[in-house]
Every structure is written in C-alpha cells, then in structure tokens.
Amino acid sequence: MRILIAEDNALLREGLVLLLAGEGHEICATVDNGDDLLPALLEHRPDAAVVDVRLPPTFRDEGLRAVVAARREIPDLPVLVLSQYVERAYAAELLAQSASGVGYLLKDRVGRTEEFLEALERVAAGGTAMDPEVISQLMIRKAGDDPLGSLTQREREVLALMAEGQSNSVIAESLFIVESSVNKHIGNIFTKLELPAPANGHRRVLAVLAYLRA
Amino acid sequence: MPPRPPEGAGQAPDRWRGAAVPGPVSAAGGTVLTPLLRGVQSSMSTPLFTASRRLLRPPFRELLRQIFRRFPPSAGYVLVCLGTGLAGLLALYALAIVFALCLVGTGFLLLPTALRALRRFAEFHRRQVSRQLRVGVATHYRLPEDGAPPGAPPSLRDPAVRKDLVWLLAHSVPGTLTCVAALIACGRAVNWLSAPVWWRLAPRERGSIIMITVDSWPKAIGAMAVGVGYAVAAAAVLSLLARLHALGSRRLLTARARVPLAQRVKHLSVTRAEALDAHDAELRRIERDLHDGAQAGIVAVSLRLGLIRRALKNRPEQVPEMVEATQQLTQQALDSLRQLVRGIYPPVLIDRGLVDAVRALAALSAVPTRIDIDERAAPLRAPAAVEAAAYFVISETMTNIAKHSGADSALVWLRITERGISLRVEDNGRGGASEHAGSGIMGVRRRVAAFDGSTELTSPPGGPTVLRVEIPCGS
C-alpha cells in the first residue's frame, strides 16, 4: 500500500514512518505543512493518506481543508484524519462529501498499533473508521433526538459500532451477542431510520451518515 | 575563582587599612611592608601625620573618590545648563513678545510655533536631567483630542505645557544663577591654585584676586595648599548644586497625567481590550503548546510502545534499543511540558515571591546584574497577577539586555509597597532602544497597561537605557 503522511511533529512523523514501513507499506511522501499537502495528495494519489488536522503555518484546520479539496478532485481518496481532540464539525465536514474511505481518529489511537493499522486498512478499502470518542460524544448529544431516539439502547450500541466502521462479526464479539442478533438489530435500525430496501453495502454507510449528521 | 594573593602582598587599600587600624591583618602579615609601616607610625605620631592619616581613612577616601567621580558629568551638566539658561532668557523675552502680540491678535499666529519650540527645548533639558540623575524623566502632555490631526500644536490649556513655562522661567533665572555660583566657586579654586603662576608673571596684580598678598614662595605654596582644599570643596559644591538643579528641573518638567474623565475611560477601555487580546493570544499559545508539544510527545511515546510490543514478537533483539529511544522521547515531552508551565506562571513566584524570583533571574542573567531591593518589603506580597506582570517585565527586559544592548552590567531596582510595585531596569549598553525595534518593549507596555500601570523608557543613543515601570495594586 502506498501511503502519504502529513504530520508536523517530527517525532510522531518518524514514528508513523517506522510503524508503517515496518508493516511493509511504501511511504510515498511525508509532508510537514498545510501548503504542500494538497499538491502532494494530487501528485502522488496515495492508496491511503494519514493526515493531521492541524498543520503549520496557521495551526488551524489546514490539514482537513486540504483533504476536503483533494477529495473533490479525486472522489473517495482514502484519508485517515488524525486530530488532537474530537471536534464534531471536523467529522461532519469530512463526511459531507461521502462516507467512504474516510477515517477520523484521535491521535492517541496510534499507540494502539493493531487497531490503528486495522482502521487504516479499512479506510484504504473504502470503509469508515470513526473514533469511539467521536461516536460517544455524538451519542450524548443525540440521546433525545428523533429519529435516533426511537432506537433501543442495544440498537444504538450496534449503530455506534457500525459508525466506527466495524464489521458485523466484530460488533457481535464486542457486545457479546451472536451475529444473527446483530443482523436483526441492523435490520431494525434500517427500518426505524426509514432507509430504502436495496440490499447493498451503501445502506450501512447511509445509516452511519444519518446517525452522524442528525 | 583565582587564588587570592597572600596577606600583606595585597593592593594598597589592604595595606592602608592594616596601617590605620592595627589588627589581625597587619599583625599576621609576614611581609616587610607592614612592620615598616608600623615603625613609621610609632616614630612619627606628630599631629600633622595623624591628621593626614585620619584624612585618608577609608570613609573619607571614599568621599573624595565620589566627589572626583561625579565632578566631570556634573561640570558638563552645569555648563550645558548655563548655556540653555542664557538661551532661556532670550526665549522668555521672545515669548513675552508673542504674548504681548496676542493682545493685538497677531501673536496667535506665532503661538503654536513658539509652544512647539518650548516643548523641544523642554525635551532637550529632560534628556540632560535624565542623564544627570540616571532616571527617566517624562511628562504627560495631553493627548490630542478626537478629530485633531496628529502632531497638533501644544495648547496652553494643557497643564503640562503651562508647567513647562514655569520651568522655563525657573531655569532661566534662578537656574542660571545657580550655575554661575557653581562656576564661581570653581574659579576661586583655580585662582588659589594658580597663585605661584600669576605671582611670577604679574607681580603687580598680587593680592587683588585672593585674600592674601602673595609675595614669596612659602606664601605661594601655602596659597596652593589652600587651593587644594578649595578645589575639593568647590567640586563638592558643584556636584551638589548640579544635583539640586537637576532635581528641581525634574520636578518642574514632570507633569502628572490629568486627563479628562471621558478620555480616561476611553484609555481604560482600549487598554482593557488590549489586555483581553493579550490574554487570548496567551491562551491560544498555551493550547497550541499543549496539543502540539506535550500531547504530541506523549502520543509519539505511545506509538513507540506499540512498536515495541510488536517487536517483542518479531524482533526481540531490537527491543532494548527501542526502549532507550522511547525513554528519551518521554524526557523530551516532560521538558516541553515543564517549559510550558514556567511560561504560564513561574513556579518560583508561588514558592518564594517576587523578591527571590527576581534575585534568581539576576543571578542567571548573561549580563552581570546588580539588584537593589528593599529587604523590608520581602514579606509583602502583591496580588499574584501583579507579581507575575512585574516578573514578566523584568524577565523580558533582561532578555532584551542580553540580546540587544551589548551592556556589560545592569541594575534591577525593585520596591514593593502596599500601593503597588515600582521597578527600574538599567543597563550601560549602547542605548537607542525603541518600541518599534522589537516587540519586547511593546509586550511589556501592554502587560503593564493591563493593570493601569505606566511604562517609561529612556534610551538615548549611547545609553544608558532605563526602563521604569509602576504597577498599582488595585485595592
């Protein structure tokens, strides 16, 4: 997999290079500022990009803005965005275009190398990877809202894990239930959220989007 | 520290002290000189010798040294003041004409020019006084009112301008007389000292300049001896008069800020907004430093630990090296955290208070720095924010001195009272510091203004640079 890394903290950048190169990935470019990021993304067209939200020169959200611009040029360019803190606006902006090939993780997660690598793989394959922290914050805010309010506690847990980008088997495992129950919950969620019937994978993404945007 | 020279082989002051006050130093001295001196002392205890010995005792020697050290700058000051005082007489005359012309109307055309010239004249003398007293001298001219073009002429309605007028009168008449008196005293000393010369060159004039008639060598030498005493006294009188003149000038040249209430409120709101801005910028800086410094450092450590966990499975032989590298990363993260905390509020201020914190600053400064702190004030604690501001001012100024001034010594003067904190930082560097050269002074001014304090910077080219800051404790 060809990976582009955009991170201004040299120590962290080196660490990421070490980790990903050690996994046999090719690091096609590393970028340490916001101005170089968009040209680099367009030039290298990596299989996945790991991007820090906040980059020099202004240390605001230039990483995110470059990603959004790049995905306008190259739809569904897989990007895993790392942020120092959870900001709902960032997640919403990322998902506004399309929910496929997008990840939004707290920086802290890179320490859990297995999970981080897994999330990266998932994003590169066109899936989503949302930080549990993002989900739980949204969950608190959403608790009283319709239509999510109509979901049961268990269904909300399942949806949260779906939003993180987990597969049905992983969801079953983490909630200590059998996979068929997961399927049943997901069916209920689709019905309650009034999502159309066609049985393709996109319905899953739509559910997550409905959840995140509500 | 270089090894001390052996006792008795020291410099002259040691020997003198040893001779005048026979004590352990001379008693223990094993050199030739000390016993010799003691011998001289016992055999020659004539009244004259005793008197001269007493005269040259350390306190008196110190006084003499002080007088001679102060003489050149004081003499320079007196000469300049004599010049400006005479010029001031002409200026008074000119002003009187302008005022007279105002009665018929035409004077109003000349008034702005005249008052501008007066202000320049006063500013020139402020610099002289500032150099003589080694403190900043500044006045508060009224700020131009709303709508007035910048550089509007001074107005007679401004109390500071009226005070300048009073100064001009005082400077020209009693000021000039003071200078003349000081110079006459010096002239007398020269007359006595030069007695032999004019006795030889112009014997017919003898006795007309000094009180005695010089007509022989012993008398001439006696006159010179009197001249020496006269010279010392004249130098002392001159320095004293110069100082009194400068102190008086300072009083007349410094007007308190008496601004209309509306202007004062406006000033307060501007400084308050600036303070909030500064506070905001500070918070942003702290947030960024925390996220991009300390937090990123910890994340990097966590990432390395993840790598180590993987290496334990695949390449256990690399683990010790990786642990080592990770520990270094931890240290870096800790260092950046510590620096950040220091920047927010210096811990030494919490523990020790301002006085000790400033002492620590001075001790660590790259430029040798003396401190002048009223010890009795040490237990007094100003509000934390005021202490932090004072500390910031001193620390920022010391950094500036080390970076830009080229000074080889500096002085920090600090007084803490119930009413507030006064401080002064001086250096003997090249001067010419301005608010526009760097943002350092600007930052100081803002921080002080946030407490409704005042900042005065005097830094003539060639130095010395003096920064005076007053921060009131809002109570």
Image (tube, rainbow, N blue to C red):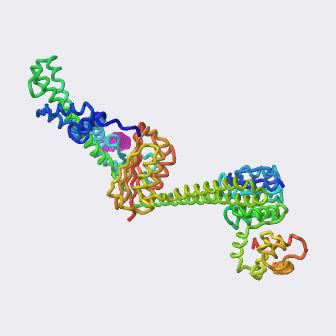
Can residue B141 be seen here? The reply is: no
**B123 falls in the magenta region:** yes
When the figure is inspected, residue A171 is found, relative to residue B435, above or below; the finding is below
Quadrant in which residue B51 is drawn? top left
Q: B128 or B224, which is in the foreground?
A: B224
Dominant SS type (magenta): helix
When the figure is inspected, residue A154 is found, relative to residue B211, above or below; the finding is below
Q: Position of residue B164 (x, y in %)?
A: 32, 46
Quadrant in which residue B258 is drawn? bottom left
Q: Is residue A195 left or right of residue B92?
A: right
Q: Position of residue B442 (x, y in %)?
A: 49, 50
Q: Is residue B6 left or right of residue A82?
A: left
- Identify which residue is drawn at 34% across, 48% down: B161
Q: Is residue B457 left or right of residue A29?
A: left
**Count of number-bearing discs:** 0
| Quadrant location of the C terminus of chain B in the rendered image | bottom left
Residue bounds of the magenta highlight: B101-129
Q: B143 or B209, which is in the foreground?
A: B209
Q: Position of residue B33 (x, y in %)?
A: 25, 31
**B233 falls in the magenta region:** no
Q: Is residue A142 left or right of residue B115?
A: right
Q: B450 or B375, which is in the foreground?
A: B375
Quadrant in which residue B305 is drawn? bottom right
Can residue B435 be seen here? The reply is: yes
| Quadrant location of the N terminus of chain B in the rendered image | top left
Q: Position of residue A129 (x, y in %)?
A: 78, 66
When the figure is inspected, residue B337 is found, relative to residue B456, above or below; the finding is below
